[in-house]
Amino acid sequence: MAAFFANLRNTVIAGIVLAVIMFLIYLQMQGYDSNLFWRFLFRWLHVISGIMWIGLLWYFNFVSTPTMPKIPAELKPALGRYITPAALFWFRWGAMFTLVFGLLLAWSNDWSLKTYLVPVITIDASEGFVNPAFVSMGIAVWFALIMWFNVWFVIWPNQQKALNIDNRYPDLAQPQKDTAAKTAGMFSRINTMLSIPMLFGMVATAHLYGQI
Ligand code: HEM
C-alpha cells in the first residue's frame, strides 16, 4: 500500500480509474448523450488544469514567497534550484491546458464560435441587447487571458533569468537577476489578485446568473 502511494504515476492512474468508474455509474443511470459528454469532459479537464495552475500560483504566493525569509541561507538554494523550477513546469503548462480546455469548453457550449465565444470575448458588445451572463463570463475570461499572458510572457521568462533555469542565463549579473525576480514576483501578485474575481465570474456565470 505504502509502496503503491509512494509512486505518483500509480496514484494519478488510480484517480483516473475512480473517475472512469464514476462515469460508468453515470452511464448506467442516465445513458450516453454525446453533446453533454463532450461539454462535460472539456469542463472537467478545464477545472482540473485550472486547479493545477491556480493551486501553484497560490502555493508561490501563500507558502513559498512568505516563507523564504525564514529559510536559513544554506537551505535557500534548494528552493531556487530544484523546487521552484519543477513547480514552474506544472504551473505554466497548467495555464496552457486551462486556456486550451477553456476555449474548447466555450466552443462546445453551443458548437459554434459565433453565438458563445464572440459575445463572451466582446463582453456582449456585438449584439443589440446585453445578456448579463455573457458580461460576467467575458470579464472572467479577459482576466484569465491577462493572467495566462503574464505567466508565459512575464513570469516564466523572468524566472528563467532570476533562477538561471536550464542554464539559459549563466552570465547574468546579480542586479539583473534581482530585477527579474522582482518583476516575476509583482506579476505573480497581480495574478493572485485577478484570480479571485476571475473565479467569481467563471463560477457565477452558470450558478449565479443562471445558464446562458
Ligand atoms: C484561460 C482562459 C480561460 C477561458 C477561455 C475559460 C473559459 C471558461 C468557460 C467557457 C467556462 C464555462 C462557463 C459556463 O458554461 O457557464 C468556464 C468555466 C469555469 N472555469 Fe474557466 N476559463 C479560463 C480560465 C480559467 C481558470 C484560470 C480557472 C481556474 C481554476 C477556471 C475555472 C473555471 C471554473 C471553476 C468554471 C466553472 C465550471 C462550472 O461552473 O461548471 N477557468 N471557463
Image (tube, grey):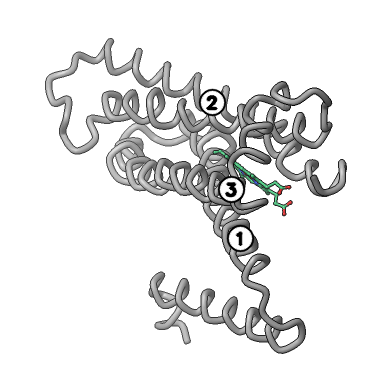
Q: Where in the figure is residue 209, as x and y percent of width and height?
A: 87, 41
Q: Residue at x 55, y 40 (%)?
A: 63
Amino acid carrying mark 2 in the image: Ile
Residue in the image at 79% along x and 48% along y: 206
| Residue at (17, 25) in percent of width and height | 169
Q: Is residue 160 above or below residue 43?
A: above
Position in image of residue 92 (x %, y %): 41, 41
Q: Which residue is tagged 1?
A: 44
Earlier sequence position, callout 3 versus callout 1: 1
The answer to whether the residue bearing label 3 lies less than 8 angstroms from the nearest atom of ligand 1 is no
Seen in the image, is 109 located left or right of residue 210?
left
Q: Which residue is at the front of the view, 195 or 103?
A: 103
**Residue at which label 2 appears:** 146
Inter-mark Cα distance, 3 to 1: 15 Å
Looking at marks 2 and 3 on the same chain, the residue that comes earlier in the sequence is marked by: 3
Q: Which element is circle 2 on?
A: helix
The residue wearing badge 3 is 107
User: Image point 30% across, 45% down: which residue?
Assistant: 82
Mark 2–mark 3 Cα distance, whole angstroms, equals 20 Å
Packing grade of label 3 (10 A; few <14, some 14-19, many >=20) is some
Quarter-of-image position of residue 184: top left
Horizontal side of residue 201 vs 142, given as left or right: right
> Quarter-wise, where is residue 189 in the image?
top right
Image coordinates for residue 76, horizontal then vertical, percent: 35, 36
Relative to 86, does residue 150 appear above or below in the rendering? Answer: above
Dot 1: within a 10 Å radius of its alpha carbon, few (fewer than 14), some, or many (20 or more) residues? some
The reply to whether dot 2 and dot 1 touch (C-beta < 8 Å) is no
Three-letter residue code for mark 1: Trp
Q: Is residue 125 above or below residue 137?
A: above
